[in-house]
Amino acid sequence: MGSAVKAPATSAPTATALPAAAEQLLSAWTAALNNADMTVLADLYADKVKFYGQSLARAQVVARKRQALAAAPGFKQQVLGQPSWLDEGDSLRVLFLKRSGLPGAQSEVRSMLVLLKTPRFAIREETDAVTEKRFKSASDEAKPASCEAAVWALVESTPFAKQLHADIERNLKEYPASDGFNPGGMGPFLPSETGGTYDVWIGVHGPERFESYAFFKVTPQGETTVECVECDASNGLLAPARSALDDFNRLCASQ
């Protein structure tokens, strides 16, 4: 079919233009899905995409979208509330709540796009909370491939972090979905940036800012401590899993 919506400019946006560019791409993506416009959809994706847990070429993603939309005529998608975003250097992570499906049978799910900044502004990852939960056990067993990933794995392996995630999920259920709150984190910030430790923040991405529930600090030796902001626990030394500590020592020793 002919192009029903116009794709946004795909050149890399400046730092100050990132939020507006992300919202423009998100709107174009939603409109293209609602109009089953494969031409625009193809323009919005990067050459390689992590698509709901699978690594696919752009043509494969578009083929799957085409097949899904053909099987569900009348499909509509709507972004609820204000998306939140996190600048990750070479990419921009956009978190949002979407309502989608056939009329009368729509559901809401927390979703995420990761947008590649260069050589063109494009979607390089698409996923949602249902998919992330499904793949969580497998990803927990996977070995981290970088020091940054090892820091996250170290923190996430502590019983405190696991309970904190459960508390955040429970707290978010008290808010209307349209408020646009999403669980998430920031970091790791490296010792060169913090003065000696790897810092990770876990909390909630809101429409206007990130609210930290706890700050985690990891020394170069792997000692992990937490400082609570919005959680009920005393600050102190945490006990990460032995395997996570081994991975951290292996990958971060030379940093």
Image (cartoon, rainbow, N blue to C red):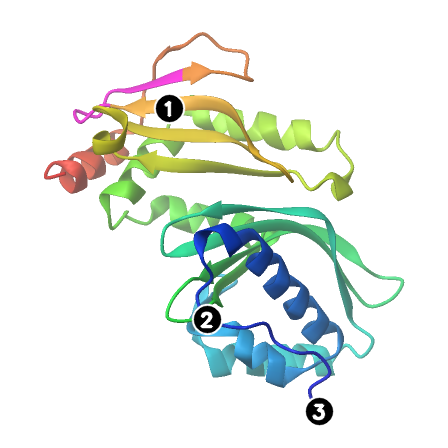
Residue 35, percent from left and from top: 75, 78
Q: Mark 2 touching mark 3, by CB under 8 A?
A: no
Give me the disc on residue 130: none
Q: In terms of secondary structure, where does tag 2 sit?
A: loop
Residue 160, percent from left and from top: 44, 21
* 71 up-or-down from 253: above or below: below
Q: Nearer the viewer, residue 67 or 178?
A: 178
Whole-angstrom CA distance, mark 3 to mark 1, is 51 Å
Residue 92, percent from left and from top: 47, 54
Label 2 or label 3, whichever lies nearer to me, is 2
Mark sitting earlier along the chain (2/3) = 3
Give me the disc on residue 2: 3
Give the extent of the magenta segment.
Answer: 219-226
Amino acid beneath label 3: Gly
Residue drawn at 62 percent across, 37 percent down: 208
Q: Which residue is mark 1?
A: 216
Q: Nearer the viewer, residue 104 or 208?
A: 208
Q: Which residue is mark 2?
A: 11
Quadrant of the rendering where the C terminus is positioned? top left
* Residue neighbourhood size for the residue with mark 2, other residues' Cα within 10 Å, grouped as few (<14), some (14–19), many (≥20): few
Q: Nearer the viewer, residue 213 or 211?
A: 211
* Residue neighbourhood size for the residue with mark 1, other residues' Cα within 10 Å, grouped as few (<14), some (14–19), many (≥20): many
The image quadrant of residue 150 is top left
Q: In terms of secondary structure, where does tag 1 sit?
A: strand
Mark sitting earlier along the chain (1/2) = 2
* Residue neighbourhood size for the residue with mark 3, other residues' Cα within 10 Å, grouped as few (<14), some (14–19), many (≥20): few
Residue drawn at 82 percent across, 68 percent down: 102
* 58 up-or-down from 242: above or below: below
Label 3 or label 1, whichever lies nearer to me, is 3
Q: Mark 3 touching mark 1, by CB under 8 A?
A: no
Q: In terms of secondary structure, where does tag 3 sit?
A: loop
Residue drawn at 56 percent across, 60 percent down: 21
